[in-house]
Amino acid sequence: MEWTREKRYRRLEEVSSKEMQELRERVGSCPWRQTYHIQPETGLLNDPNGFSYYNGEYHLFYQWFPLGPVHGLKYWYHTKSVDLVHWENVGIGIEPAKFFESHGAFSGSALEYDGKLYLFYTGNSRDENWVRHPYQCMAVMDENGTIEKFENPVIHGVPEGYTDHFRDPKIWENDKRFYAIIGAQRSNATGCVVLYESVNLKDWEFLGEVGTELQEFGFMWECPDYFELNEQGILLFSPQGLQPEGDHYQNIYQSGYLIGDRLDFTTCEFQHTEFKELDRGFDFYAPQTMVDHNNRRIVVGWMGLPEIEYPTDRHGWAHCLTLPRELILEDGKLIQRPVEELTKLRNKEVEIETHLTNERKSFDGFNGVTYELCCEFVNHDASEFGIEVRVGEQEKTTVKYDAKHNKIVFDRSLSGESFAEEYGTVRQCEFSSNKIKFQLFVDSSSIELFVNDGEEVFTGRIFPKLESKGIQVFADGGEVKMKAIKWDY
């Protein structure tokens, strides 16, 4: 299908039931549908929105264009869970129906206040000349799940000095006041975030731009998030337009964070250390965090990237969300660990222990398509060692430790159907440790790799044949001792 502007901005009610049924059948026949990740029933999913804990349940919305694998008229789709593992599709949460969201309900966040859940989002509108006019909008969900919008936006227009790339408010409460940061682009086409304050969630005052040392760091900062851990401030955002530097910034767009002193609400200054990427893999963008009833800071990201075509596109759908990860601040770095509840997915367990010397090994019963796999490597003098998953006659995805160069390597050059190869097929980062632990969550078309309990994380989509189910462990240039446990999902 040629996705003209008219087709991208059709509304759901304009589409026949026959067309939707045909689309569902195309999606349902796709061999790469995920089994335990949040994914769209049809069409395109992107940014996680409104991630929150309210009324005894986790709520997670996401950007959704229901009619195909492209960016068009965006809805908020609502899913919820009691345990962060089993998700229930609720349905459309925010429908772009009012003048201030005529061309989509863009990303935003949520805050529980006074017994209700407030949803703060960007309304995207365009005039007859296709000029964008963003609005910051509010809706409220009650305990019954009913969502009602404010009649008018709470922030009209854009402050002087910024372009119409002005979106993705993240809201929080501090000392009986409400704050929101918004992703922005300065008039000189550089990225930043700005800060607003409110006493009642209706009237918002522009406090100014958040002062950082990154004055020319990409052309737009999307999906900002500010929170505090261990009495330090953390600014999470997704800068667009960074150039690759060694192993860094290899994707079309990046996501990462700054750690520093607490944000000064009076001066808007944020003193910080260097920018660090949150995920070192191929497909991770627009993460959003929340604090749950157990006081955990949990993050979910979009397992995908803008402006990239994926093999699922021809099946009428695109993208999924990452697994929820708990964020912990240790030694000036954010550690990401899969939430403990994910152990509920574990079924049949297989355990192996072996010694490898310049060889590859496979084991009976050690294979599959969807599973969790933990491998520990010790006592090594091999130049490199690791594991290959989704192995077939001509396919494999390799995760290894390059001891010669002290690097973790995630290689999807032979992972199946190729895509986005202009951005490379290998991701790697420096890492040094006597013991290497790989924890992999393998789904039908993705891998999430946690290294040494979340010191580094790599996320990537892969599109192998269904029959590529093998698992192999290997050592080259020496020996290594390893043990592994696999749980079917």
Image: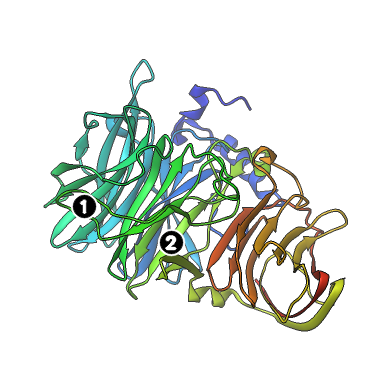
Q: What is the three-letter code of the residue carrying label 2?
A: Val
Q: Residue at x 68, y 42 (%)?
A: 311
Q: Which residue is mark 2?
A: 299
Position of residue 285 relative to residue 292, above or below, is above
**Left or right: 11 as drawn, with respect to 443:** left
Position of residue 41 relative to residue 350, above or below, is above
Q: What is the three-letter code of the residue carrying label 1?
A: Tyr
Q: Residue at x 37, y 15 (%)?
A: 129
Percent from the top left, x then y, of residue 40? Answer: 54, 49
Spatial CA distance of label 1 from label 2 is: 20 Å
Q: Which residue is mark 1?
A: 179
Percent from the top left, x then y, of residue 210? Answer: 26, 46
| Residue extending farthest top | 129
Percent from the top left, x then y, of residue 170? Answer: 30, 50
Element under disc 1:
strand
> Quadrant of residue 343 in the image?
bottom right
Q: Quadrant of the N terminus?
A: top right
- Dot label at residue 279: none
Element under disc 2:
strand
